[in-house]
């Protein structure tokens, strides 16, 4: 890139946010409808006071419907400034395993910066850098997965343990059947108390019943350019990499792609 990019170059000013005194159910509705990974929490003076993630939103149940956002939010792990150098900002995000961060201008909320914006910038300004890399060079090979008979509670516990927002569903022969993501669980109406109870995994649906059965799949020789285009066009966080007969080889997510570009 000819000039040094800053966070402002990838700022999403239209990213949804919530206020401190919004209801928890309102926050859940916003996340369900938009599919965003985080909701910044701001006060009446447009200062960032916290963040709601999908894990917190999954904790919202009918019995907790009277709670306010301020009761559920967490302190933001990172807040960026619009003038921060972009590559260093992305390095900071990845060092704490965050894909999105609230951004301020001065002390006022300005929007959200995410890995999707970082990848979109390269797609527009330096596609050759993406074209020269094969997905097999960037993908993660030690993939955490679930089996089709695993119940939803077990799927959720694996997501929490490994801090993954999506897991492929693999049969006994190593073939990809589908994928399950946290936003799928939110849109299906699951809540953390049900997912984490000892009895729920025995009663709940299996991975086969709730998975997306037609996940986006690429072969190992596809270019990173093709993979990034798919992730951005389809608004998905990860692509499953398969060999012949849909045999699982790896997972390529936005973080994997971003790390290649940071090199």
Image (spheres, rainbow, N blue to C red):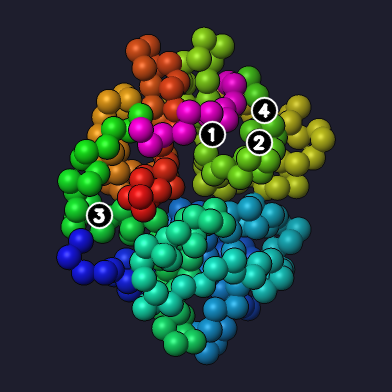
Earlier residue among tags 3 and 2: 3
Earlier residue among tags 1 and 2: 2
Mark 1 touching mark 3, by CB under 8 A?
Answer: no
* Left or right of 18, for residue 240: left
Q: Residue at x 46, y 16 (%)?
A: 175
Label 4 CA crowd tier, 10 Å (few <14, some 14–19, many 20+): many
Residue 210: x and y in percent read 55, 31
Q: Name the residue carrying label 1.
A: 167
The answer to which of 253 and 215 lies nearer the viewer is 253
Alpha-carbon span between mark 2 and mark 4: 11 Å
Above or below for 131 versus 103? above
Q: Residue at x 76, y 58 (%)?
A: 63
Q: Name the residue carrying label 2.
A: 158
Element type at marker 1? strand
Residue 62: x and y in percent read 71, 56
Task: Give residue 209's mark.
Answer: none
Earlier residue among tags 3 and 4: 3
In the image, which residues are magenta?
137-148
The answer to which of 60 and 91 lies nearer the viewer is 91
Mark 2 touching mark 4, by CB under 8 A?
Answer: no
Above or below for 127 versus 65? above
Earlier residue among tags 1 and 4: 4
In this view, the mark in front (3 or 2) = 3
View extreme (front): residue: 263
Q: Name the residue carrying label 4.
A: 151
Q: Name the residue carrying label 3.
A: 122
Earlier residue among tags 2 and 4: 4
């Amino acid at each position: 890139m000819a000039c040094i990019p800053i966070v402002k170059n990838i700022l999403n000013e239209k990213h949804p946010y919530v206020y401190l005194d919004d209801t928890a159910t309102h926050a859940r509705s916003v996340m369900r409808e938009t599919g965003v990974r985080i909701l910044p929490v701001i006060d009446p003076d447009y200062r960032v006071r916290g963040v709601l993630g999908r894990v917190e939103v999954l904790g919202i149940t009918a019995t907790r419907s009277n709670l306010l956002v301020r009761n559920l939010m967490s302190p933001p792990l990172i807040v960026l400034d619009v003038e921060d150098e972009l590559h260093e900002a992305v390095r900071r995000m990845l060092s704490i395993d965050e894909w999105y961060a609230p951004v301020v201008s001065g002390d006022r909320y300005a929007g959200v910066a995410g890995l999707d914006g970082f990848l979109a910038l390269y797609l527009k300004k330096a596609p050759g850098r993406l074209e020269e890399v094969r997905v097999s060079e960037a993908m993660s090979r030690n993939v955490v997965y679930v089996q089709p008979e695993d119940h939803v509670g077990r799927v959720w516990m694996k997501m929490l343990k490994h801090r993954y927002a999506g897991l492929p569903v693999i049969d006994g022969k190593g073939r990809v059947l589908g994928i399950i993501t946290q936003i799928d669980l939110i849109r299906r109406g699951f809540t953390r108390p049900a997912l984490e109870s000892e009895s729920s995994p025995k009663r709940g649906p299996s991975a086969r019943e709730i998975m997306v059965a037609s996940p986006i799949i690429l072969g190992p020789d596809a270019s990173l350019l093709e993979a990034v285009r798919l992730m951005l066009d389809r608004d998905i966080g990860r692509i499953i990499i398969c060999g012949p007969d849909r045999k699982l080889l790896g997972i390529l997510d936005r973080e994997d792609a971003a790390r290649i570009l940071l090199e």
